[in-house]
Amino acid sequence: MQTVVLDALIPREDFEIVSDIGNGGNTRNKTTLSIEDLKYDSFFFAALRKPIFQRETNEWDPKKICAMIESFVDGELIPAIILWRNQSGYIFVIDGAHRLSSLGAWINDDYGDGIVSLKYYENYVSEEQRKIAEKTRKLVNEKIGSFREIMEICRNVNISTDERKKKIAKNLGALALQLQWVEGNADKAEDSFLKINQLAIKISNAELELIQNRNYAYALAARAIVRAGKGYNYWSSFDEEIQKKIIGKSKEANILMFGQAQYTADDINNLPIGGAQISTFTLDVVTQTVKICNGITKLDTAKEASEKEVLKCIENTLKILQFINSKEKFSLGLHPFIYFYSDIGKHKIGSYYGILL
């Protein structure tokens, strides 16, 4: 299933450093969220953050995103967004990141390929990500209309003959999302996050593993490789030269696993060895790749996330990927279609892991 990458819309922040400060007695938190609050240049949206351990916001496909936006503009019941605010002013999303990001994508016209995403990923957005973003935009614009179009109708109702869009424009200013707030410090907020997020769309085993083991080198290495060194800088406390090496080698590993361009099953000479770059299994594939390449079979064999160990994990992973299929002189040059795909073009994850071993 192809899913939409909305991860850039709400950036990450580490709230462990403020674990002893929470303002549970604050009675001035707002209780609803309006359209204006979800514009990229609004005060509220500027303060909005995801916890550093939050899974990537890429679990929903175009139809689900469109359905979420439709539910909102039609005034249907949407579960409350759960937030936590620290005293430094950041507002963390405990539950509802996909809901907020879907609406934010519509309002800011960014489904993974817009200004916000390009800035977040430093213009490194894959063709696969651009293609699914445009597919989502087209679906939403056909069924609902772009946010810009609805706003233009709101200002001048006579420019459109579409009665549904006129109704949306008329009601949009009165619509709001309900908010609930977690009280307490960062430990309470993290506990709430883990409990809540395993009740609804359950956190995948791979994501849960990286959350729980985020202080281990292999977990940071997997985070780096899955986004080619872009996005949130989990290694910001490391030496600057080490950071540059992590980013560069993570990008190399990502390209070797997933390629650089959109591919089809017919294009057998350009199939990536790691399968699809954007899927619900991508994070697990990268995590297992890092663990296999570094001989990590159980947690007590994993190293703490020092800058030396994180870089070593990435370098070991890159070396084995290069050995399998790259332009390096020592590479075996294994053809992906022969070794990692079925005759109908489906990626065989077991064969891939077997070669790594």
Image: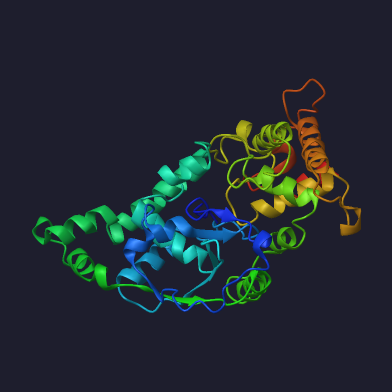
Residue drawn at (62%, 59%) of the image? 55
* Quarter of the image that includes the C terminus: top right
The residue at the far top in this view is 329
Q: Is residue 288 above or below residue 33?
A: above
Q: Position of residue 249 (x, y in %)?
A: 71, 33
The residue at the far left in this view is 158
Q: Nearer the viewer, residue 117 or 233?
A: 233
Residue drawn at (59%, 53%) of the image? 279
* 10 relative to 187 in the view: left or right: left
Residue drawn at (41%, 74%) of the image? 30
Q: Is residue 79 above or below residue 221?
A: below
* Quarter of the image that includes the N terminus: bottom right
The residue at the far right in this view is 301
Q: Is residue 42 above or below residue 340?
A: below
Q: Position of residue 331 (x, y in %)?
A: 79, 26
Would residue 92 be visible to someone looking at this image? yes
**Quarter of the rendering containing residue 52:** bottom right
* 50 relative to 161 in the view: left or right: right
Would residue 348 be visible to someone looking at this image? no
Q: Position of residue 165 (x, y in %)?
A: 21, 64
Q: Position of residue 299 (x, y in %)?
A: 87, 58
